[in-house]
Amino acid sequence: MHAVFLAIDTAFLIEKLVLIVVVISLSLLIAMYETWAERKVAAWIQDRRGPNRAGPLGLLQPLADGIKLFFKEEIVPNTSNRFLFILGPALAMLTAMMTSAVIPWGGTIEIFGKEVSLQIADINIGVLFIFGVVSMGVYGIMIGGWASNNKFSLLAALRGASQVISYELPMGIALISLLMVTGSLKMSVIVGQQIDSWYHIFHAPLGFFIFLVCAFAECNRTPFDLPEAENELNFGYHQEYSSMKLGFYLFAEYINMFISSVVMVTLFFGGYDIPFVSDAALRESWGANPTAILQAAVLFGKTAFFIFLFMWVRWTIPRFRYDQLMDLGWKKLIPLSLVNLVITALIILPWK
Amino acid sequence: MQPLTNRAKPVDRRPMTLVERIYLWNIFKGMMITLKHLFKRKATISYPEQKRPFSPVFRGLHILNRDEEGRERCTACGLCALACPAEAITMEAAERKKGEEHLYREEKYAARYEINMLRCIFCGLCEEACPKDAIYLSETFAPANYQRKGFIYGKKDLLIPHPKEDPEAYKKALGNRYKQSQNAN
C-alpha cells in the first residue's frame, strides 16, 4: 500500500488536478455564456435586442439566471423515486463534463522546467471514450424522465433514448470513415496529423456532415429537440424539475453543445492548430507558453463558430416530426454513412 | 369567383423536386435569411431611456389645469362626472373664501377631486364635457401600484404644477399641448 502511494508522482497528481479544475470551470463558464449568447443570437435573428439590462450588454444575465435558479424552491414530487430523481440531473451533468477529459486543449506548456500537456488524459482510445460517455448521457434523460413519474416525462425520456440510440449509429459509422484515415483513436495523434498536413474535413467531408447532424440530435437541439417538445410534451423530461436540478439539465445541454463543438473541431478542424501558421516555428520564436495559450485561444475560436452554428440552426429550422426524425436517422443517415464508409475505403486503399 | 385582392396564390401541389426532398439546400436558404436578420436594424426600443412618440390624440392620465396665473380652473360643476361613462370621477365642491382669489379662478372650486384610474377607460369624454378647459388627458399613462387605493388619484396627483412657481415642470406637464398653444398663437 505504502509503496503504491509513493509510486504516484505528486507533481503529476497536482498538475492533473489543476488541469481538471481549470477545464471544468472553463466549460462551466462557457456554458454560462452560451445561455447568454443563445438569447442574444435568438434576439438578433428575430430583430430584437436580447438581454441588455444586467451589466454592460447584459453580460451579467447568466449570473442573475443562475442566482434565480439557486434560490427557487426545490420540489421533489412525492410519487417519484427520490434517489433516481436526483440522480437524473447529476448524471446528465456528469456525463457532459466527463468528455472534456480526453480533449487536447492546446500544445504543451512549460512550468518550472517541466513539460505539461494541456490534456487531462491522453488515452489511446480517446474517440471511443467520448462515444461511451456521450451514449451514457441518455441515462440522465431516461432516469430523470422515468423518476418524475409523469406520463409526459416518460414519453419524452423514451423519445430521447430512442433518438440518441438511432443517431449514435450513423455517428459511429461516420466516425469510422474518419478513423480509417487517421488510423488512431488517440486524440493527440489525430490533432497531430492535422497540424502536419490537411485538416480531416478535407479527408472526410461527408463524414463530418453526418457527424454534425448526429451531434445536433445527440445534444437534443432543434431541429431534433423532440424530448423537450414543449407544445406536445409540455417541456418533456424536465417538467417535474425545479430549482438547480432543472438548471443542471439546461446547463448540461449547453455543456454538451460546447463539448460536441470541441470534439468536432478536434476531429475535423485541426483542434488547437493555428491555421496558416506553422505551430512548430511559432513555438521556436515565441516560446512554449505563449504558443500554447494562443493555440487554446484558437481552439476556442473555432469552437465558438460551431456553437454559433448550433444556435443559428436552432433559431432557423423548425422541429422535425417524430416519424421524420426516425426516417432521417434510419433510412437516410445510416445508408449514407455506410456509402461514405465504402467510398472512403476505396480512396484510402491505394495509399495503405 | 372574382378574387378580392391580387395577393391570392394557388397552392402548389406538385411533387417535391429532388433538391427540395434533400432539404439541405432549403435549410441553407433559410439560414441565409436568418443571417441577414442578424444584421438588420432592431425593431425594439430600449423603453425607459427611449420612448416612442405618442400620437397627438393620445389619451393618457388626466391633468387638472391651471390658468396662466396658476389658479385652478375647475369650478366643480360636475359635468365631467356626469359625462364619465365609467363613473370614475367624484368631487366635492366648496366656496371660495376671501383671500383665496389667487388660488381659484372662480367662486366655486373642487375641494376634493378624485379619479379612480382602475375604473377610468380613458375615453376623454370628461375633457370634452369640461366648459372651463380644466381637465384634459395627458400623454402619460397610469403607473403600476401595489394597492388598489393607489389608483385613486386625488387633486395632489392630478393638478398641473404651478406655472409661476415651477415653470419647468409646468411646461413639461403641458408637453404637446404647450407646443400646440405656441403654434396657435
Image (tube, coloured by chain):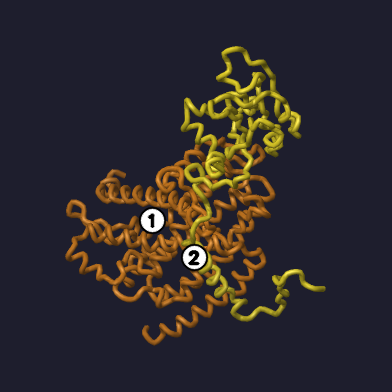
Chain colours: A orange, B yellow
Q: Amino acid at mark 2?
A: Leu
Q: Chain of mark 1?
A: A
Residue at label 1? A101
Q: Is A169 drawn above or below residue A66 in the view shown?
A: below
Q: Amino acid at mark 1?
A: Ala
In the rendered image, which quarter contains the N terminus of chain A?
top left
The reply to the same-chain question for discs 2 and 1 is no
Query: Looking at the image, which residue is at 45% across and 60% down?
Result: A307
Helix, strand or loop at mark 2: helix
Query: Looking at the image, which residue is at 67% across and 35% down?
Result: B127
Helix, strand or loop at mark 1: helix
3D distance between C-alphas at marks 2 and 1: 34 Å
Q: Does residue A217 show up? A: no
Name the foreground residue: A39 vs A82.
A39
Between disc 2 and disc 1, the foreground one is 2
Residue at label 2? B35
Q: Position of residue A340 (x, y in %)?
A: 50, 79
- Count of marks overlaid on the render: 2
